[in-house]
């Protein structure tokens, strides 16, 4: 028996009068159409999936009739131009107002009390002092001494007194050769006595603080008038008066009369030379 498909291949198609061969040919045609439809559907699904992912770029066919499919690489988003960084446009940058300088604090009142009589580096409330009602600076009642510097020939030209915050101040101003600075011996004595004669010196108050300045000219040079006599302060808390007895053998003697003994300190200032005696007086 002859295979109907051989007849189809040989004749190029089924004879019109053979129904079996025509049915076979129809089924074969349907199978081919289904295969093409399935293939097209699969290809469409793949293309839809790739396009949906944003990764398909279709280009014109190459010289072999194929379709070019390119997957682009990821790139960083571009920064918009024209937008400055930092402070948004139209918003003023914050500014810092300048801090004003604190107002200057004047020195305390006092008779002939000058601002430049403040010892260098020794502010009116020294942090080393006792904040709970004690001395405003390191002080005690022991004798205080210092050596003469740069030769002698000095003359005491003025004595000033004044009241400061927590203490009384006595300032001895001197003039003399350039570079000469006085020495001193300062301490409490039982009685005010003139050094070269031993005579008593009248002095107000209940305590006597003797001040001996060294490096003093026995005879002041022409044009310099030494300070003599007494200084009576008007606004001090403990100091009642300062009395001078004159110069003898290179020393100038004076006494500070106080209501009672109290801790003190002695400091030296220059330009002009000054010896400053501070007595604690709350």
Image (tube, rainbow, N blue to C red):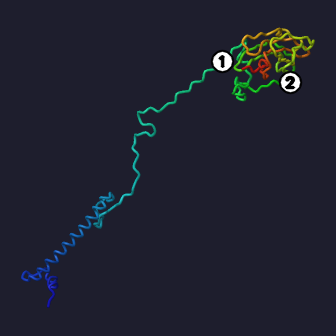
Where residue 162 sits: x, y (%)? Answer: 73, 15
Residue 71 sits in which quadrant? bottom left
| Residue 273 is at least partly visible in this image | no
Which of the labelled discs sits on residue 252, or is there none?
A: none
Relative to the observer, which residue lies in front, 4 or 130? 130
At a point 28% along the width and 63% down the height, the residue shown is 47
| Crowd class of label 1 (few under 14; some 14 to 19; many from 20; radius 10 Å) | few
Where is mark 2, residue-wise? 147
Side (left or right) of 128 relative to 54? right
Residue at the image position 8 percent from the left and 82 percent from the top: 19
Q: Looking at the picture, tell me which residue is in the foreground, 11 or 96.
A: 96
- Placement of the C terminus among the 4 image quadrants: top right
- Mark 2 crowdedness (10 Å alpha carbons): few <14, some 14-19, many ≥20: few
* Foreground label between 2 and 1: 1
Q: Residue beneath label 1, please?
A: 106
Image side of residue 172 versus residue 22, left or right = right
Query: On the picture, is 7 further left or further right than 214?
Result: left
Which quadrant: the N terminus? bottom left
Instruction: Residue 277: tell me if it is visible.
Output: yes
Residue, far left: 17
Q: Quadrant of residue 160?
A: top right
- Residue 34 in picture, x, y percent from top left: 19, 72
Q: Secondary structure at mark 1?
A: loop
Up-down relation of residue 52 to residue 119 (above or below): below
- In this rendering, is residue 71 above or below 241? below
Work out whether residue 210 or residue 88 is closer to the camera in this orientation and state it.
Answer: 210
Residue 104 place in picture, x, y as percent: 63, 20
Viewer-proximal residue, 193 or 75? Answer: 193
Asked if 52 appears above or below 130 in the picture, the reply is below
Residue at far bottom of view: 1
| Location of residue 199 in the rendering, given as x and y in whole percent from the top left corner | 91, 11
Q: Secondary structure at mark 2?
A: loop
């Amino acid at each position: 028996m002859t295979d109907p498909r051989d007849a189809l291949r040989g004749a190029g198609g089924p004879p019109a009068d053979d129904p079996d061969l025509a049915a076979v040919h129809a089924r074969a045609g349907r199978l081919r159409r289904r295969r093409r439809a399935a293939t097209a559907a699969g290809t469409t699904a793949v293309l839809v999936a790739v396009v949906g992912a944003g990764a398909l770029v279709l280009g014109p066919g190459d010289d072999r009739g194929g379709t070019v499919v390119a997957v682009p690489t990821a790139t960083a988003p571009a920064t918009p131009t024209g937008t400055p960084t930092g402070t948004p446009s139209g918003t003023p940058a914050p500014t810092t107002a300048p801090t004003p300088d604190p107002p200057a604090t004047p020195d305390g009142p006092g008779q002939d009390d000058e601002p430049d009589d403040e010892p260098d580096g020794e502010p009116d409330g020294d942090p080393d002092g006792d904040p709970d009602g004690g001395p405003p600076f390191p002080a005690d009642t022991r004798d205080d001494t210092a050596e003469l510097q740069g030769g002698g020939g000095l003359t005491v030209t003025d004595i000033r007194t004044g009241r400061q915050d927590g203490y009384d101040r006595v300032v001895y101003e001197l003039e003399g050769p350039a570079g000469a600075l006085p020495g001193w011996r300062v301490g409490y004595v039982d009685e005010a006595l003139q050094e070269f004669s031993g005579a008593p010196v009248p002095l107000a108050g209940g305590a006597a603080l003797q001040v001996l300045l060294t490096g003093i000219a026995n005879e002041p040079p022409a044009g310099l008038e030494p300070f003599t006599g007494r200084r009576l302060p008007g606004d001090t808390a403990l100091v009642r008066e300062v009395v001078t007895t004159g110069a003898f053998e290179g020393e100038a003697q004076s006494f500070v009369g106080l209501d009672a003994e109290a801790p003190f300190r002695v400091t030296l200032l220059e330009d002009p030379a000054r010896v400053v005696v501070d007595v604690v007086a709350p």
